[in-house]
Amino acid sequence: MSDEYDDYDDYDEEDEELEEQDGESTPGDGDALNRSLALGFLAMVPLFLVYELALIATRSGERNTSELVLFRLFAPFGEWADSARRVALAAAAACALVVCLRRHLALGPRIARIAIEGAIGAIAIGPALIALIHLLGDSLPPLVLAGGPETRAPGLAQAAFVFGAGAYEELVFRVGAYSALYLCFVQVGLFFGLRRGISGLLGDVAGLLGSAALFSAFHLAVFVAWLGPGGEEFDLSIFTYRALAGMLLGILFRWRGPGVAAWTHGLFNLALLLGAGPEVFL
């Protein structure tokens, strides 16, 4: 693959070589390392933790669709499924930690930077969504998911749930769907004789549009009925809004990595829950 379109989990072998020269990461390798899956996954750990705490606190049975999809294989465990999921998350976090420690990364500052970039992304994504919707000429879909002057403020557990759910959705739709579509269409392009750079561009377009469409579709009842009750009826404006949000998160994932995309997603979900609608962003 060309330098412009590196693989997500193996961004820059040069970074590791530079680290080996002096035993620590170099000032210029931060962007590549921030995009790595290992560091990105570690940055998601706080989101996973608050999600699990929300499940324990509420015991309402409400689950995020992406979490159910990701850990569907644990369904046969029955009442032990939650424990199996938590063990799997802990094992994945331990593996990511080992990878990062082998790179001699200063994890605290790097994860803090990812969270800060996520906060900036969460602030920016609202105006960007509104601008895109107006540019397309569609009616502005409602952005307020909860809250407002006539409704009760959300509880801490509910806020933790929507915040942590962003990490699962980024794992499924950006790390999973985007990457799978990207790799598939790169190979299709190469099979038909396209240059690697063009094939990479084709893969990015397919990954961006396809993952955004799937992200929006998996909020609909018709697509999630196999997981149990839940989901919404189709509404064109809401579907368009979510697809555009998925595209913006896909761009952020490709540019800054899964950790920044997850923090952006989680914090933006939280802002919507607290009542940050169009009147806040404009």
Image (cartoon, rainbow, N blue to C red):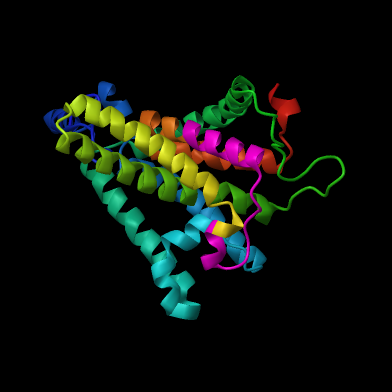
Q: Is residue 270 above or below residue 193?
A: below
User: Can residue 64 be seen by looking at this rendering?
Assistant: no
* 259 displayed left or right of 265: left
- The segment highlighted magenta reads 223-248
**Residue 139, quarter of picture:** top right
**Furthest residue toward front:** 192
Q: Residue 106 at x, y = what percent?
A: 32, 36
User: Can residue 92 be seen by looking at this rendering?
Assistant: yes
Q: Is residue 99 above or below residue 255?
A: below
Q: Is residue 236 magenta?
A: yes
Q: Is residue 59 above or below residue 66?
A: below
* 82 displayed left or right of 122: left
* 212 displayed left or right of 160: left
**Furthest residue toward right:** 150
Q: Residue 215 at x, y = what percent?
A: 50, 46
Image quarter hosting the C terminus: top right
Q: Nearer the viewer, residue 37 or 241?
A: 241
**Residue 64, quarter of picture:** bottom right
Q: Residue at horizontal 54%, vertical 60%?
A: 224
Q: Is residue 208 magenta?
A: no
**Helix, strand or loop: magenta stretch:** helix
Q: Residue at horizontal 38%, vertical 28%?
A: 255
Q: Residue 146 at x, y = what percent?
A: 74, 45
Q: Residue at horizontal 59%, vertical 24%?
A: 136
Q: Residue 175 at x, y = what percent?
A: 37, 45
Q: Nearer the viewer, residue 5 or 270?
A: 5
Q: Is residue 91 above or below residue 180?
A: below
Q: Nearer the viewer, residue 108 or 188?
A: 188
Image quarter hosting the N terminus: top left
